[in-house]
Amino acid sequence: MKYRLVLSTVPDEKIGIRVAKQLLREKLCACVNVIPKLSSFYWWKGKMDSSRELLLLIKTSQSKVHKLIGRLKKAHPYETPEIISLEIKEGWKPYLDWIGSSIK
């Protein structure tokens, strides 16, 4: 089985926890880490901007990543949310097996 790490930022803890629980309830991921106190600097609508955010690290399988991205887009408050999927090429086999068994 192939696995993915999906990254997304959210504006506050309440939204981060709500999104994490929704994705978990729907068995679209095995785990979501909600990392607080992130400072983001970016270009938006032609101007440099910044904000305080939280980072979501979402572990899932390749087979569920497209549905997960669709759900994340719908649940996300941003006009253009950061949603990036990275392939997990290597990892500790028992942990990777746990991801697979958690989302069946």
Image: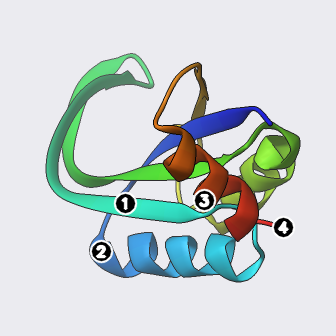
Whichever of callouts 2 and 1 sits on the residue coming sooner in the sequence is 2
Give the residue drawn at x 47%, y 45%: 8
Location of residue 101 in the rendering, given as x and y in whole percent from the top left corner: 73, 64
Distance from disc 2 to disc 1, alpha carbons, whole Å, reads: 11 Å
Mark in the foreground, 3 or 2: 3
- Quarter of the image with the N terminus in it: top right
Residue topped by disc 2: 13
Distance from disc 1 to disc 3, alpha carbons, whole Å, reads: 16 Å
Residue topped by disc 4: 104
Mark in the foreground, 3 or 4: 3
Q: Is residue 93 above or below residue 46?
A: below
Location of residue 102 in the rendering, given as x and y in whole percent from the top left corner: 68, 68
* Relative to 76, 14 lies left or right: left
Q: Residues within 10 Å of mark 3 (few under 14, many from 20)?
A: few
Q: Secondary structure at mark 2?
A: helix
Q: Residues within 10 Å of mark 1 (few under 14, many from 20)?
A: some
Residue topped by disc 1: 33
Whichever of callouts 1 and 3 sits on the residue coming sooner in the sequence is 1
Whichever of callouts 4 and 1 sits on the residue coming sooner in the sequence is 1
Residue at the farthest front position: 94
Residue topped by disc 3: 98
Q: Residues within 10 Å of mark 2 (few under 14, many from 20)?
A: some
Q: Amino acid at mark 4?
A: Lys
Are dots 3 and 4 in contact, CB under 8 Å? Answer: no
